[in-house]
Image (cartoon, rainbow, N blue to C red):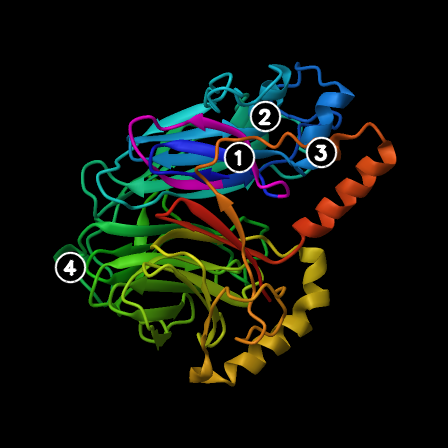
């Protein structure tokens, strides 16, 4: 799924490189962020295609397109510059589009019906700070909910953190299951050793990450303590955590704050194990932080100079082996997540990049590929500054060892194209052909994809490491 500067959200069948469905989610502004939240189907919904709208009858013929897309149950959360955050049930949207006979009009390429969000939240969008979400599901086997709403039936909490409407330097955290504002004006606390927070001029919040961290000594079975990592306009990074044993209104305290950048933090991310974070700025510096175990209130850091002056996005892969940067110069730079040594520079886009993302490496495959990936990354770590740009002049397939003699070629998608694929060969009535197609799609979807998009409205997919 992609969101563009005109407020449109598009669902893609990457296998066919065609649009499946699109709608004008944010008519008054661009899409800042799209995040998917998975959920388990309701116990009474016996393998229905949707766990929210189970009254829609789906025939076998209508079921095939959804099978081909490899859909599972997800909410989609979109954050726009129109001061709105919307929550969509993507499965219900696609099912209704199939029931209407066609998801896009052949004449205009526009949707035949306009979906309605299941929840909307008005927020501050005066700056370009993207939201952060944290979803906590009900324990497995729970069939009774205190909040009988679509979100309440699938999750205990869905937290969304955004800049406060009263000050862009402060953070508000909402629980949209309740719904209520759980934390107000995070960053306005009085004291935090060794820095007086009230006297520190952080400037506007530029990036936010919400996460739970469980103490290894905690044997009570609790979910963990809520933390917020914030990057600021002055180049500093600050970690907050929820105060323990507070009987009154919930609040946050500062764990540490550190300034490694001379310019505003432009991009940041945290590892899936919540042990490390990285940040980038326009000062040509990539910084890695150890979130916990700091000495004298200051986190350990690793700093790596960059050969570019601007980064729009940075992401860890979920196995925490590599990370990637989307540059203003249109290049994707891949680094070892352990040492920050550069591994590859992927070059395809002619204009600046805005965003990137990794496909998840499936957990059941992690053990099998762990040694192979670690050996490859470690070998390239040893090369250090021998890293070179990779062009797309060769049509060779991507390999584990990326070099200029065997460069990867991205699969490109033109996001301006409104056409749908009329080739329905995958939708054959032959069950054996269908099963073969689904098997091929499943194998193809498990590849280690890296995707990027930017100003020229094109999407590139790379298979690396």
Quadrant in the picture for the C terminus: bottom right
203 or 216: nearer the viewer: 203
Q: Real-space Cα distance between discs 2 and 4?
A: 48 Å
Q: Real-space Cα distance between discs 3 and 4?
A: 53 Å
Residue beneath disc 2 = 94
Q: Secondary structure at mark 1?
A: strand
Quadrant hosting residue 296: bottom left
Q: Which is more foreground, mark 4 or mark 1?
A: 1
Residue beneath disc 3 = 67
Q: Earlier in the sequence, mark 3 or mark 1?
A: 1
Give the magenta part as a residue range: 15-35
Quadrant hosting residue 331: bottom left
At which x and y percent is residue 96?
Answer: 59, 18
Does the magenta portion include 28?
Answer: yes
Q: Which is more foreground, mark 2 or mark 4?
A: 2
Q: Which mark is residue 11?
A: 1
Q: Real-space Cα distance between discs 2 and 3?
A: 12 Å
- Tell me: 346 left or right of 91: left
Residue beneath disc 4 = 200
Looking at the image, the residue that sits furthest to the left is: 199
- Tell me: 303 left or right of 425: left
What residue lies at 19% left-to-right and 56% top-to-bottom? 202
Q: Which is more foreground, mark 3 or mark 4?
A: 3
Question: Is residue 379 among the parts visible in the rendering?
Answer: yes
Check if mark 2's residue and mark 4's residue have beta carbons within 8 Å. no
Check if mark 3's residue and mark 4's residue have beta carbons within 8 Å. no
Check if mark 1's residue and mark 2's residue have beta carbons within 8 Å. yes
Q: Secondary structure at mark 3?
A: helix
Q: Is residue 378 above or below residue 450?
A: below
């Amino acid at each position: 799924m992609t969101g563009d500067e005109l407020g449109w959200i598009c669902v893609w069948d990457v296998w066919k490189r065609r649009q499946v469905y699109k709608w004008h989610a944010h008519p008054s502004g661009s899409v800042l962020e799209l995040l998917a939240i998975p959920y388990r189907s309701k116990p009474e919904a016996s393998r229905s295609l949707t766990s929210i709208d189970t009254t829609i009858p789906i025939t076998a013929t209508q079921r095939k397109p959804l099978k081909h897309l490899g859909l599972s149950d997800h909410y989609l959360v979109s954050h726009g510059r129109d001061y709105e955050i919307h929550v969509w049930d993507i499965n219900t949207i696609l099912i209704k589009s199939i029931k209407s006979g066609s998801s896009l009009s052949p004449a205009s390429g526009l949707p035949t019906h306009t979906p309605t969000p299941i929840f909307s939240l008005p927020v501050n969008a005066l700056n370009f700070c993207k939201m952060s979400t944290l979803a906590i599901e009900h324990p497995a086997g729970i069939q009774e909910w205190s909040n009988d709403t679509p979100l309440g039936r699938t999750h205990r909490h869905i937290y969304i953190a955004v800049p406060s409407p009263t000050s862009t330097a402060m953070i508000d955290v909402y629980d949209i299951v309740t719904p209520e504002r759980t934390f107000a004006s995070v960053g306005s606390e009085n004291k935090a050793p060794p820095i007086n927070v009230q006297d520190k001029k952080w400037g506007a919040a530029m990036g936010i990450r919400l996460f739970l961290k469980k103490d290894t000594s905690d044997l009570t079975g609790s979910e963990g303590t809520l933390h917020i990592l914030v990057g600021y306009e002055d180049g500093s990074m600050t970690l907050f955590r929820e105060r323990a044993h507070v009987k009154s209104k919930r609040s946050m305290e500062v764990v540490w704050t550190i300034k490694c950048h001379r310019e505003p933090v432009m991009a940041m991310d945290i590892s899936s194990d919540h042990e490390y974070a990285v940040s980038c700025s326009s000062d040509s510096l990539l910084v890695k932080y150890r979130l916990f175990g700091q000495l004298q209130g200051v986190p350990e850091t690793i700093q790596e100079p960059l050969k570019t002056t601007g980064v729009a996005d940075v992401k860890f892969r979920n196995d925490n082996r590599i990370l990637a940067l989307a540059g203003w110069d249109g290049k994707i730079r891949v680094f070892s997540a352990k040492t920050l040594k550069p591994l590859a520079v992927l070059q395809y886009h002619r204009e600046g990049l805005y965003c990137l993302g990794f496909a998840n490496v499936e957990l059941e495959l992690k053990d099998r590929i762990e040694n192979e990936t670690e050996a490859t990354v470690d070998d390239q770590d040893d090369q250090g500054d021998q890293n070179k740009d990779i062009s797309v002049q060769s049509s060779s397939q991507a390999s584990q060892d990326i070099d200029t003699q065997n460069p990867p070629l991205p699969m490109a998608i033109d996001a301006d194209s409104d056409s749908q694929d009329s080739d329905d060969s995958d939708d054959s009535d032959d069950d054996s052909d269908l099963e073969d197609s689904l098997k091929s799609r499943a194998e193809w979807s498990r590849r280690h994809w890296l995707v990027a998009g930017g100003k020229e409205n094109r999407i590139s997919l790379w298979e690396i490491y």
